């Protein structure tokens, strides 16, 4: 029974995190690819990877600010 809830939580949480990275990456790419609509940018590849890099850069910048404040 616990395996069922663990698998359910893992699949839902994993998909949610990926979608957040994907939307973040598409939003960041949309800033630079103005000739496409947001839906076109969202349907392109690499949005999840770009979103992950953007989130890591933001978290790293926050840690850098805290350390050197």
Image: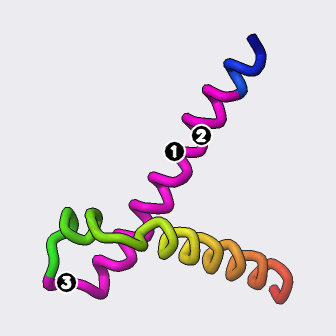
- Residue 24, magenta (yes or no): yes
Q: CA distance from mark 1 to mark 2?
A: 5 Å
Say if 68 sits above or below 58 in the image: below
**Quarter of the image where the C terminus is located:** bottom right
- Mark identifier at residue 16: 1
Q: CA distance from mark 1 to mark 3?
A: 27 Å
The residue nearer to you, when weighing 12 against 23, is 12
Disc 1 is placed on an element classified as: helix
Say if 48 sits above or below 68 in the image: above
- Mark identifier at residue 13: 2
CB within 8 Å, label 1 to label 2: yes
**Residue at 47% in and 65% down:** 48
Q: Which residues are magenta?
A: 7-35
**Residue at 25% in and 71% down:** 41
Mark 1 against mark 3, which lies toward the viewer? 1
**Residue at 62% in and 80% down:** 57
The x, y position of residue 7, in whole percent, is: 66, 28
**Based on the displayed image, in which of its 4 quarters is residue 63 positioned?**
bottom right
- Mark identifier at residue 33: none
User: For the stretch drawn in magenta, what is the main secondary structure?
Assistant: helix
| Classed neighbour count for the residue bearing mark 2: other residues with Cα under 10 Å, few (<14), some (14–19), many (≥20) | few
The residue nearer to you, when weighing 25 against 67, is 25
């Amino acid at each position: 029974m616990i395996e069922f809830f663990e698998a359910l939580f893992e699949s839902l949480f994993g998909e949610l995190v990926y979608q957040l990275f994907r939307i973040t990456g598409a939003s960041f790419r949309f800033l630079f690819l103005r000739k496409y609509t947001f839906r076109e940018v969202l349907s392109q590849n690499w949005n999840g990877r770009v979103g992950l890099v953007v989130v890591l850069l933001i978290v790293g910048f926050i840690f850098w600010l805290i350390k050197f404040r």
